[in-house]
Image: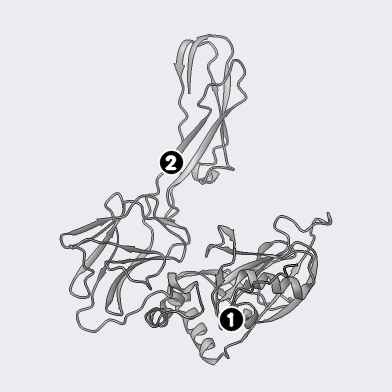
Amino acid sequence: MNIFEHDGSKLTVDVVFDSVYSSASRNEISNFKNQQLNFTGLIGNATKFVTLSLTDDDIYEGNETAIFGLENLSNGNLGDFISHTVVIEDDELPEVKMEVIQNQNQSFLLIHNLESKAVDLSKWQINYGDFHYTFKERLTLNVGETQFVTNTENESLPANTIVINEESFKIPISSATIELKNRASKKIADFSFPKEKARETTSLKVLSNNSVPSNTVSTEARVFEENTEELQKATPGWKYLSNSSFGEDFPEMDLYFWSEESSQFQRYENQLILDYDPLLVGYFDEKNAEIYNEKVTKEKANSIELSTLSFSLSATDRNQNERVEGSEGFTLVTNNSNQAILSSELSKQIQSKLLLKSEPQLFKSNIDFSDIRVLNNERIFPEELFWVKLREEVPFQTLEIDVNLITKLRIQKKKIT
């Protein structure tokens, strides 16, 4: 902190850690709370510094910010710079996995985020041989997501695909080692092709950009989706269990369910008695992701495709102010039918079946539930999670809706008189 033209009178100010807007926690800066700076007796200009001790760990957290403010000035006025931000660069390397797949005669480089936090790919590099490619700024790979990289435009490409239109860029399909380096040129991951046995081609299940207009997609997109479904389940990340009995297969994991009544996620215990079978969510590491893949694949093979969407919901006025507001009335739901459904039509059906005064709102959130957005006439694909937000009190009940009523946009015709 700098002061100018001070007359030596009493002058103190507190440097305070802003725990609300800082992404770093207090224990990462050695539990710093506040520190008083004393300029009393100093005449003219002066500068004082605050030294921070950082607590290092072996957990990847990405770059974080610690924000400090100036408060309780004893005399005079604060200038323009009353807030100071310290950027803490994480020296731990994130766990990222790379692989190459081939689908429909097109090669893809896949970058998987295996961390429980988002990974910033800004200015990272792909290197192999004489080829080098640098990612642009503000490229983030969220929890459980995969970044696709290819060199050819295609109508059925996944939404999060980077197409590198450079003649020198050809994704190798054998006899090469590809390296991924961060902006500090530290190697994060590499991928080498097996020499002795053929590789199994795997990838993430993706939704085609062209799948929105109808429930049918091109043959190429459907083949891509079917061929790549396995790794979505086998890759570490946030996942959900539609049957709570599966929770017994993951005894060491922390699994959570959304409680509408308390408007928050609660830890699930096997002995917990509920009136319904909740969706369980949790972060699956590589070992548990393999078990998850086996369970879900077996369940899908034995399941019967449903032509009805079935789910339970409720809305509780928790603070008893005669309004369902804020986080009240949210229910976490999955599309357990065999078709993509329209959010706008589902909202109308829920309103009709529950005799509501207003249509409920439907939302989607990030895979780690860190962000949420409203759905406006968008498709919700089979096995996708979404939220239903009711705006008035509704007791707990189960709805069954014919998917034929919620897969196409229905326009009500008005009589012209």
Task: Name the residue: 76% across, 76% down.
Answer: 353
Of residues 158 and 358, the one drawn nearer to the viewer in this rendering: 358
Which residue in the structure is indicated by mark 2? 87
- Mark 2 vs mark 1: which is more N-terminal? 2
Rendered view: 257 above or below 72? below
Residue at 54% from the left image edge and 92% from the top image edge: 302
> Is 390 situated left or right of 75 in this image?
right
Q: Secondary structure at mark 1?
A: helix
Image quadrant where residue 235 sits = bottom left
Vertical placement of 133 versus 175: above or below? above
Q: Amino acid at mark 1?
A: Phe
Residue 130 drawn at (x, y percent): 15, 60
Q: Which residue is mark 1?
A: 246
Judged from this view, the residue extending furthest toward the front is 417
> Could you tell me which secondary element the residue under label 2 belongs to?
strand
Residue 313 shows in the view = no
Q: Position of residue 165 (x, y in %)?
A: 25, 61
Q: Is residue 131 left or right of residue 208?
A: left
In the image, what residue type sits under mark 2?
Val
* Rendering coords of residue 258 (x, y %): 66, 67
Q: Residue at x 48, y 75 (%)?
A: 288
- Which sits in the foreground, 108 or 357? 357
How dense is the environment of label 2, judged by Cα within 10 Å: few (below 14), some, or many (20 and up)?
few
Classed neighbour count for the residue bearing mark 1: other residues with Cα under 10 Å, few (<14), some (14–19), many (≥20)? some
